[in-house]
Amino acid sequence: MQKDKIVLSGMRPTGKLHLGNFHGALKNWVALQDKYNCYFFVADLHSLTTAYEHTENLAENSRNMLIDWLTAGLDPEKSTIFIQSDVPEVSELNTLLGMITPLGWLLRNPTYKEQIQELLKQKYAGQLDEKSLGEKINSIAGDEEISSFGFLGYPVLMATDILIQQAAYVPVGKDQTAHLEIARDLARRFAEIYGEAVFTEPAPLYTEVARVPGLDGRKMSKSYHNAINLGEDLDSVRKKVMTMFTDPNKKKATDPANPEGCVVYAFHRIYNPNAAKRCEECKAGALGCVACKKELFALMEPEMKAFSERRKLFENDEALLQKIVAIGKDRARANAAKTLATVKKVMRITR
């Protein structure tokens, strides 16, 4: 137990969450709240870095995310759960830290160009030939509507979220450590410039991340329309399971198959304690894909049913949702205000 240590993490609200979000992050969050002083936030400001022109569903998406978190087991009695924009101190500290962030740090950020590439591919799919798209991608800005000030500076906002709450740990997969570096660098740079170490330097908290593919074998994503949502109707889940991608070389039930790359087997590894046995049966052609999918749904059904029932309870209790958000806002603001006051004093900008 390290309840004196703050753990912080957040998600951008893009609608209802799916099983990839649950097994990839939320299950870890639920476990962490029994060990640490956890702060979990709905990152609505971060949504504006790539979708500033699409805010019509932002409030509803934030509400749905909150409901899904509670459905998954986050407990407001154990954790501070809040909306990012409810804490104005974040925006103020983001401005101050932005003043001392070298532009080169942001331009060298490895995910900056990657995200620019992905956004341009989505925006100009079918409109530009490969050469023209390549030229846009290789330019520094790429596209003035995509490469905005906020988009370039999102690592500073992310660092601000971490530093303002004095988070000691941020849960990440081992391939995501680079995301923390700018927060650590800014904590050190602030101390070097102003002569006082104000911020806790965050460390990665490595967590096991279950890789959950979508129905078609790609990454599970709402944008790919290949996801199973938390709380989804059981009949809908059953139909989706029956459409899951399997080994295309298995033509008959008795044909041997390769379970690696099979979406059904990937889910068996999550839900079936006898997944290793199922793997050998698949390789030996002892079980057809239809039967394998039916068994998988039977294994998933209890959890999916519980999700659905639990989600409805929160959906229908608006007063409870508002209370949770209000309490989280007060806690997060109180903690953030202490940090901001110290920062302004050390920077000698308070009167």
Image (spheres, rainbow, N blue to C red):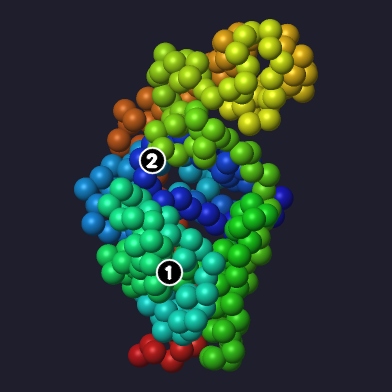
- Is 269 positioned to the left or the right of 54 in the image? right
Q: Position of residue 84 (x, y in %)?
A: 39, 58
Q: Position of residue 108 (x, y in %)?
A: 52, 74
Most foreground residue, 346 or 236: 236
Marked residue nearer the N-terminal end (1 or 2): 1
The amino acid type, in three-letter code, at marker 1 is Asn
State the separation of the CA atoms marked 1 and 2. 25 Å
Residue 271 in sight here: no
Establish if 290 lies above or below 19.
Answer: above
Most foreground residue, 123 or 41: 123
Q: Secondary structure at mark 1?
A: helix
- Is 213 positioned to the left or the right of 275 in the image? left
Q: Residue shown at 34%/30% (left/top)?
A: 315
Q: Nearer the viewer, mark 1 or mark 2?
A: 1
Q: Position of residue 154 (x, y in %)?
A: 42, 67
Q: Residue shown at 36%/45% (left/top)?
A: 14
Pointer 1 residue: 138
Establish if 287 lies above or below 92.
Answer: above
Which dot marks residue 231? none
Crowding near the residue tagged with mark 1, few <14, some 14–19, many ≥20 C-alpha atoms within 10 Å: few
Q: Residue shown at 54%/33% (left/top)?
A: 217
Most foreground residue, 93 or 36: 93
Crowding near the residue tagged with mark 2, few <14, some 14–19, many ≥20 C-alpha atoms within 10 Å: few
Establish if 45 lies above or below 305.
Answer: below
Q: Secondary structure at mark 2?
A: helix
Q: Residue shown at 53%/48% (left/top)?
A: 79
Q: Position of residue 102 (x, y in %)?
A: 48, 84
Q: Are marks 1 and 2 in contact (CB under 8 Å)?
A: no
Pointer 2 residue: 223
